[in-house]
Image (tube, rainbow, N blue to C red):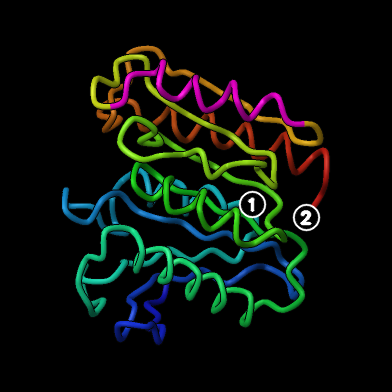
Amino acid sequence: MPEVILPGASGRIEGRYSPGKRPNAPIALILHPHPKAGGHMNNPVAVTLHQLFQQRGFATLRYNSRGVGKSQGEFDSGIGELADAATALDWLQANNPGASQTWVAGYQFGAYIGMQLLMRRPETDGFISVSPPSNMYDFSFLAPCPASGLFLHGTADTIVPPVEVERVVNKLRTQKGIVIDYELEEGASHFWQDHMAAVDRRVGAYLDKRLEEKPA
């Protein structure tokens, strides 16, 4: 997949882009884990998410947020990272003006940024949030959540106990008009070691279900 350089608020943003298979292909933006914990766009979970959308014909972009890899700037405690995400989605939409659907997928810190982006982009059709750090960041901004999506978490996650994610999921499920899927993978940790196949299987099955309900 070709490297792309996007112009961002703090300078260039480094990304990897897979074009769609047709002019009106759906689009997907992939967000990586926390930069201060070694997160980058080539994290195995982020790459797996990218490949899952790519395999289904999406025009798919993942990128390094500011200060990571070749991306310029410095970590900005989530504020600048949200701006980078918006810039990346703008670029993806500009390069795919006829996109039939828009999806946002993130892992860990990327899930937090992705859900914030979701709130600012009502055109988003769906989301994937893997191991969202709901005990580290306030997710109360999801009121109301504008799209249906999947939360995927591991039962052996000691960094973000499942009960913390369930609290967010239960709140979102009180809203009308959206459907929140919540799946727990037995034995998976926050980092999904030895459980990458589960990410592939569960997210893939969810995407297939959603695309069958509403073809892109």
Query: What's the residue at 43%, 70% (across, down)?
Result: 83
Q: Nearer the viewer, residue 195 or 114?
A: 114
Residue that label 1 marks:
56
Query: What's the residue at 59%, 54% (across, down)?
Result: 118
- Report whether 24 appears left or right of 46: right
Vertical placement of residue 45 versus 5, above or below = above
Vertical placement of residue 45 versus 154, above or below = below
Give the number of the disc on residue 115. none
Q: Amino acid at mark 1?
A: Arg
Placement of the C terminus among the 4 image quadrants: bottom right
Q: Earlier in the sequence, mark 2 or mark 1?
A: 1
Query: What's the residue at 81%, 36% (across, down)?
Result: 177
Q: Which residues are magenta?
A: 160-175
Residue that label 2 marks:
216
Q: Nearer the viewer, residue 97 or 137?
A: 137
Vertical placement of residue 64 versus 127, above or below = below
Q: Is residue 48 magenta?
A: no
